[in-house]
Image (cartoon, rainbow, N blue to C red):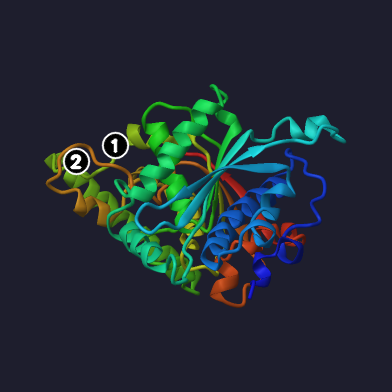
Amino acid sequence: MTSQKDLFEVSGPTYLTYVNWNCPHHRRSVMASLVQGVYVLERDRQCNRQGPDARAPAWWSFFHFELRQVLIDAADGSIFGAVYAFQPPLHLLDPTAAASAPHYVVAFRGTIAKKGSAKRDLELDLQLVRNGLEGKSRFRAAMQAIHDTLATAAGQHDRVWLAGHSLGSAIATLGAKTLVRAGAPALPTFLFNAPFVSAPVERIGDRRLRQGIRIANSFVTAGVAAVLKRGGGGGAVHDAAFAAMAAWVPNLFVNPADPISAEYVGYFDHRRKMEAIGAGGVGRLATRNSVKDLLLGIGKGGSGCEPLHLFPSAVLTVNRGPSPDFKTAHGIHQWWRPDLSLSLECTAHYYT
């Protein structure tokens, strides 16, 4: 039986009959819908829904996209991503509203806890927490798709957008960072409920206790990084390497009731607090390192690599609306609700 959440006409943003690509609410809603399209592609595959029975196409065709490529994980044959191409209608009500639309979108889904994909997805979730996704076949396939799409875009890199949810956000993040490290232009990126691999301090109710824990953690992290840097042990991320990422400003969407992504709220707010108390240097050193990754880098030489979940810059959008359970707080559907703009806090953070 088809889940109601898979049906675009039931659960999708059908109110968006006109998309103004200059409107952040419209961009967020469409990008989340394209990610949902990848989820439904995989569920169509698992349920053997084909042709007119397929539920996925409505999630992109409604917004005048066509499916150019399906990304398949070689380990289990599951669909984890898709490449979409924007095909605007011949007659536009407002051509300027479509002028800033992407030409292509590469989107990645998160974990699906169903028999056909759960084992591989959960394996990658664990790998993300332990050592990262570099070298995994799913990420290699994602990176190849991104490179191929950029080649098709013929130099218009700003018209190639990345989007992902949960585990898919981690893949999109790693893809975008890999390009920037290689000297390529930063791609517009939309990250929904991206995993923050750390203790969920943001979930602690007492504000002063949260702040105290973060300050203490910053001094510990900065201390470990400084010792490793002086000792030449590797692992510590140099300021220049981290600052080079600052030109990439992803759109980061989180919910404070979601333990997987909530820590981004405190991560960026804490950077400002450290500056305010005169410990900006400690804060900057701590903000580009994590103790876990520092210790894992010991003995490996080199200058280290910043942890995947740490960002120099981002436009952070926080959903402060009611979220009664984990599925609501972590779900992709929250990001296109028509009343969502009333619950959002949006702040731009830049690394200096």
Q: Which image quadrant for residue 196?
A: bottom left
Query: Could you tell me the amino acid type at mark 1?
Result: His
Residue 243 placement (x, y as % from top left): 40, 34
Q: 66 above or below 262?
A: above
State the separation of the CA atoms marked 2 and 1: 9 Å
Q: Is residue 340 left or right of residue 318?
A: right
Q: 144 above or below 309?
A: above
Residue plotted at (33% across, 51% down): 133
Q: Residue furthest top?
A: 155
Query: Could you tell me the amino acid type at mark 2?
Result: Lys
Pointer 1 local density, CA inside 10 Å: few below 14, some 14–19, many at least 20: some
Query: On the rendered image, what quadrant is the N terminus found in?
Result: bottom right
Residue 31 placement (x, y as % from top left): 63, 48
Secondary structure beneath label 2: helix
Q: Nearer the viewer, residue 311 or 186?
A: 186
Residue 120 placement (x, y as % from top left): 37, 62
Q: Is residue 169 left or right of residue 68?
A: left
Mark 2 near mark 1, Cβ–Cβ under 8 Å? yes
Rendered image: mark on residue 266:
none
Q: Is residue 279 visible?
A: no
Rendered image: mark on residue 238:
1
Q: Earlier in the sequence, mark 2 or mark 1?
A: 2
Residue plotted at (82% across, 49% down): 17
Q: Residue furthest front?
A: 51
Residue 70 placement (x, y as % from top left): 52, 47
Rendered image: mark on residue 229:
2
